[in-house]
Image (cartoon, rainbow, N blue to C red):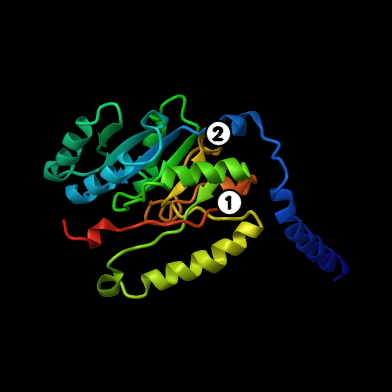
Amino acid sequence: MIVCAAIVAIQVALMALRPIIACLPTSLTAGQQRSVTPRFSIHVATHSEPPHLVIRTLRALLDQDWPSGGYEIIVMDNNTADPALWKPVATFCTAHPCRITFLHRMGVRGAKAGALNIALAHTRADATHVVTVDADYVVHRDFLSRAAEALHRTGADYVQFPQSYVATTTTAPGVDAELEEYFRTDAAGADEAEAVLLTGTLCVISKAALIDVGGLVRCHHDGGCGPGRAALPRRFYRAVYQPGRGQGPAAAVPA
């Protein structure tokens, strides 16, 4: 009983000190020092998605207020048998040869996790962080800028942004309220304990840390990584929850 009380007291004390520690200069490792000006590799996994939906996502990613040379986009289409679904996306990507890499693979195992691990293997050598964005998620122009600011401010190994969806009133009532409640309470509380979980959408992860834990892992019986958690929390990497904004899924918006 005394031991438990002592542990609780220590945890409370550490949480009280965290705001003060956050204001102190951060002692960065060599990898974190390089991430002060991060180079992002944005990974978009697709499977039998409507082409207009994916292209809308890619247009938003191309329009970031971040130097074009400071990030790349990799579209990893997995197991889409119908050429009418993946070839229009490939054509769009071909029109942006220096910005987007399009990969199409059949026989991919592990669903989204498997696809993202293939994308990780094709990530440019100088990338410092991997960004996962769903095929139907339209980000705001300041998404990468806000991610860079969070990384610089905290020195965290990964950043989790909240999710927000449009047109859910008729298609999925209650989704927005449930997500808002989770990110406002659970995620914010976990941030205080540096125990934020990755949801697989709008995650910014240190490339070195992701490689160190062996990439993304399968999380559910269906073989997918949804919600796309990596094994990072088990290795005690620093995490941060970054309140932000987003739009999606584009599937709920007319083409």
Q: Would you say 204 lies left or right of 153 here?
A: left
Q: Tell which residue pokes out farthest to the left in this image.
A: 84
Q: Is residue 190 above or below residue 142?
A: below
Under mark 1, the amino acid is Val
- What residue is rendered at 45% in x and 38% in y? 130
Front in this rendered view, residue 188 or 45: 188
Report the residue marked by disc 1: 240
Q: Nearer the viewer, residue 168 or 123?
A: 168
Q: CA distance from mark 1 to mark 2?
A: 15 Å
Residue at disc 2, secondary structure: loop
Q: What residue do we see at 56% from left, 42% from top?
A: 151
Single out the residue that lies furthest toward the right: 2
Q: Position of residue 126 (x, y in %)?
A: 47, 25
Residue 116: where, in percent of width, then height? Answer: 38, 41
Label 1 packing within 10 angstroms: few (<14), some (14-19), many (20+) = many
Residue, x 16% and y 45% (percent of image)? 85
Q: Is residue 102 above or below residue 11?
A: above
Name the kind of residue labelled 2 in the image: Ser
Residue at 11 percent of width and 44 percent of height: 84
Q: Quick one: SS at disc 1?
A: strand
Residue 61 badge: none
Mark 1 or mark 2, earlier in chain: 2
Residue 108 visible in the shown view: no
Q: Which mark is residue 35?
A: 2
Is disc 2 surrounded by few (<14), some (14 to 19) or many (20+) residues within 10 Å? Answer: many
